[in-house]
């Protein structure tokens, strides 16, 4: 019996040592993931993912916002679902949210008046803030760290999170009820903002950007949305990741631009396969701040 007991203890010690040698937030530490769905506003829900056996009660939260041109897409698309589960296996809490698809059946191109485009960005940003507040109010129940909320967005979702983080001093984006919300970092897949001049020392946060330099919908530097002609109703100048990164650098804020010289708007989805870049950035720039690479040259796999 003593020998058998000794072997069991050794086995438990081995399992325990193996878990602790894995680096949380970088490597897979857990296998099973649970998901709960919550309604955070009228007709809007979020899916909350976390590892089943994770007893850590102060997890960084990734708030994920899907793409789809503000007219389609779902919080549980296969890419979003797989990403959420993968990040939960590394020890993160993940909330993949729905938001108002205000352009559904209307389009979002050069015929869309510029002011309607701004209103679209504002509605999506407000929903991001609303979901954030809902999660903050349930932090103890969900075991999340309210000081470590990281925004992640793809295409339209990237524009939603970028505007929620950086554009709240613009007249159309002032939501007093969410004024106290602060984010720890941001990850953008092919997104842009209205005006980098509204990024300030107070709202600058560590940011990782994925973008194709030949994206013909969302500019890499500064250009009009969808590259619309100046005479078009939808002419609206946006600042892309290269311009945003320069602004953040001015405030000495950590930022990385991962770019594909030949890439286009397919980098709205391709970053879901770049897990090591994402986890390394979160680990080095947000959770344990130190210098990171400012530019990464990407290639499609």
Image: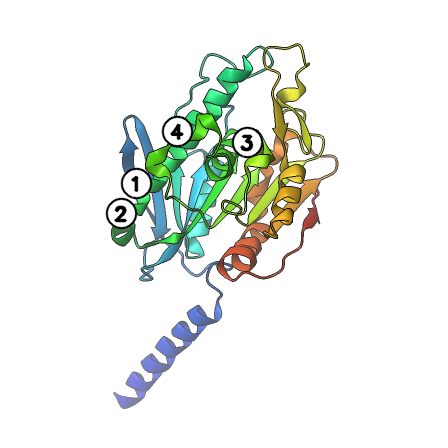
Q: Residue 221: in sight, yes or no?
A: yes
Please report whichever mark, 3 or 1, sits nearer to the chain's N-terminal start.
Answer: 1
> In which quarter of the view is residue 155 placed?
top right
> In which quarter of the view is residue 54 placed?
bottom left
> CA gap, disc 2 to disc 3?
28 Å
> CA gap, disc 2 to disc 1?
7 Å
Residue occupied by mark 1: 134
- Locate residue 298 relative to residue 30 in the image: left or right: right
Residue occupied by mark 2: 138
Seen in the picture, residue 97 relative to 149 is either above or below; the reply is above
Looking at the rendered structure, the secondary structure element under dot 2 is loop
- Locate residue 187 relative to residue 1 in the image: left or right: right
**Foreground pick, 134 / 74:** 134
Q: At 61% across and 28% down in the image, what residue appears?
A: 238
Residue occupied by mark 3: 155
- Locate residue 212 relative to residue 104 in the image: left or right: right
> CA gap, disc 3 to disc 4?
14 Å
How far across and down, in percent of the image, does residue 257 sit? 65, 45
Q: Are marks 3 and 4 in contact (CB under 8 Å)?
A: no
**Foreground pick, 85 / 289:** 289
Looking at the rendered structure, the secondary structure element under dot 4 is loop
Q: At 55% across and 40% down in the image, what residue appears?
A: 199
Q: At 27% across and 34% down in the image, what residue appears?
A: 39
How far across and down, in percent of the image, does residue 61 sit? 40, 50
Seen in the picture, residue 221 relative to 31 is either above or below; the reply is above
Q: How is the image coloured?
A: rainbow
How far across and down, in percent of the image, does residue 284 sit? 56, 59
**Foreground pick, 142 / 89:** 142
For label 4, the crowd category at 10 Å Cα-Cα, with few meaning under 14, some 14 to 19 and many 20 or more, is: many
């Amino acid at each position: 019996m003593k020998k058998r007991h000794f072997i069991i203890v050794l086995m438990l010690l081995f399992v325990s040592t193996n878990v602790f040698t894995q680096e949380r937030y970088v490597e897979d530490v857990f296998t099973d993931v649970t998901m709960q769905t919550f309604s955070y506003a009228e007709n809007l829900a979020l899916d909350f993912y976390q590892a089943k056996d994770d007893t850590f009660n102060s997890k960084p939260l990734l708030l994920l916002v899907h793409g789809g041109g503000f007219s389609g897409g779902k919080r549980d698309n296969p890419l979003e679902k797989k990403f959420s589960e993968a990040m939960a296996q590394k020890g993160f809490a993940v909330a993949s949210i729905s938001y108002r698809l205000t352009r559904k059946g209307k389009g979002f191109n050069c015929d869309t008046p510029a002011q309607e485009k701004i209103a679209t960005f504002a509605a999506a940003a407000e929903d991001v803030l609303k979901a954030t507040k809902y999660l903050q109010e349930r932090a103890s129940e969900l075991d999340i760290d309210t000081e470590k909320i990281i925004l992640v967005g793809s295409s339209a979702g990237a524009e939603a999170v970028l505007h929620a983080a950086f554009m709240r001093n613009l007249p159309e984006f002032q939501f007093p009820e969410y004024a106290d919300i602060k984010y720890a970092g941001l990850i953008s897949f092919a997104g842009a903002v209205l005006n980098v001049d509204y990024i300030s020392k107070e709202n600058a946060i560590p940011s990782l950007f994925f973008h194709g330099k030949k994206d013909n919908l969302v500019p890499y530097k500064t250009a009009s949305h969808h590259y619309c002609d100046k005479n078009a109703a939808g002419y609206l100048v946006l600042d892309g990741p290269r311009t945003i990164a320069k602004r953040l650098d001015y405030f000495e804020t950590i930022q990385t631009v991962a770019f594909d010289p030949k890439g286009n708007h397919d980098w709205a989805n391709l970053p879901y396969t770049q897990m090591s870049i994402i986890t390394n950035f979160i680990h080095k720039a947000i959770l344990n701040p130190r210098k990171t690479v400012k530019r990464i040259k990407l290639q499609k796999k």
